[in-house]
Amino acid sequence: MTCLPGHTDKKLGLAIDLDTCVGCHACVTACKGWNDQGYGVPLSDQDSYGADPSGTFLNRVHSYEVQPAQGAAQIINFPRSCLHCEDAPCVTVCPTGASYKRVEDGIVLVNESDCIGCGLCAWACPYGAREMDADAGVMKKCTLCVDRIYNENLAEEDREPACVRTCPTGARHFGDFNDPDSKVSQLSAKRGGYDLMPDMGTKPVNKYLPPRPKDQRLEASLLAPLLDIEAKGFAGWLDRVLGKI
Amino acid sequence: MHPAPSVIIFSVLSGLGFGFMAYLALGVLPLRGTWAFWTWGLGYAFAVGGLIASATHLGNPQRALKAFSQWRSSWLSREAWAAVLALFALAPIALGDWLGFGVPFVWRGLAAALALPP
């Protein structure tokens, strides 16, 4: 049923730190690597080695050059994946019941055996988080690695989404936003985590942590105060004598 | 947004067909006999042709009937129901115009209203 649950027990999601993300695409690769081989159909590629390669990804990183009002231009690396919205428009538009939001943890998933590949959910999502698999003709989206986070065959430190596990700068954090004491809730509160496009009314669970303000470059040299020092006493005499040579 | 060509064909043809048939259902044109047959036939051809085109853009058209299941939440599902119901509701009016028997005006209005949402 594609009606949204009124309330979910947990609100699992990601806190993504735009300050520490260096845009290395390790999360993109790890996501594709893991999700190619387990949950649902593999993420196919088309024309992989040809002139116009394309493929299905659940997570992409876009990099932007931003010019702040003051100071130097900044690069913002912006990882994008499903935000597992509380009011997910992609779920309610689904005509077949393939899309659903789980009551227990709020993860938005697609039941691929019901999906007819009409693509309406991808049109409804304002974040462009869903991608149609061109080979299988079914909609693919981030599962928050639902086959990792509860997987008791994995070591405990591996029971988090592949993108979070692999991030070399620790820019991605996974946890329950329903629990105010969780790591992600604390981090989001401390760093001013914000929703993407809140005006769309989707109430995204994932939070983005804004880049920290950059230090201002000093105009004068740090050594400037030393320029005015005048040597006195023995040092002053030595300075004068040596200066005459 | 890059809609598939079949989606564009669907929205143009079905919109044209259902709109035309809603107009015919209200009895605006005085249709009789063979003339009625071909006019209604044109409306049905547009509407059904559009619906068939819409199925061709699906990744898995063999499961298309599942699209009728989520009428509680999905407008696409409601639209599918309205299209099918309208095609059936319009049929007696089309037959009546062609073969020359009367259909109550209430039915005509109802069928026209059903034909408009798709």
Image (cartoon, rainbow, N blue to C red):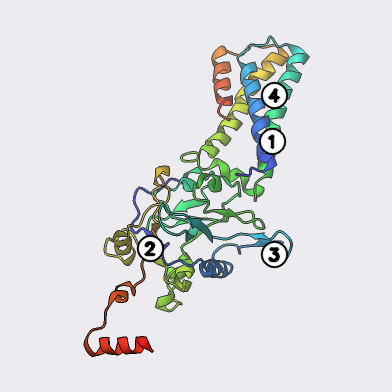
Tell us which disc is closer to us: 1 or 3: 3
Between marks 4 and 2 in the image, the one whose residue lies nearer the viewer = 2
Tell me the mark number nearer the camera, choosing from 2 and 3.
2
- In this view, the residue farthest toward the top is B30
CA gap, disc 1 and disc 2: 52 Å
Label 4 resides on the chain identified as B
Distance (Cα) linking label 1 and label 4: 15 Å
Describe the element under mark 2 as helix, strand or loop: loop
Mark 2, residue position: A214
Outermost residue toward the front in this view: A244
Residue designated by label 4: B43
What residue is rendered at 35% in x and 89% in y? A242
Q: Mark 1 is on which residue type?
A: Ile
Q: Residue at x 62, y 17 (%)?
A: B23
Residue A112 visible in the shown view: yes
Nearest-to-viewer mark from 1 and 4 = 1
Which of the chains bears the disc numbered 2? A
Q: Amino acid at mark 2?
A: Lys
Number of the front mark, 1 or 2 = 2
Any mark on residue A182, and which?
none
Distance from disc 4 to disc 3, alpha carbons, whole Å, reads 45 Å
Q: Which mark is residue A48?
A: 3
Query: SS class of the residue under badge 3?
Result: loop
Residue B109, position as x, y percentages in the image:
55, 17
The answer to whether dots 4 and 2 both sit on one chain is no
Q: CA distance from mark 2 to mark 3?
A: 40 Å
Residue A220 relative to residue A51: left or right = left
In this rendering, do the residues under marks 2 and 3 share a single chain? Answer: yes
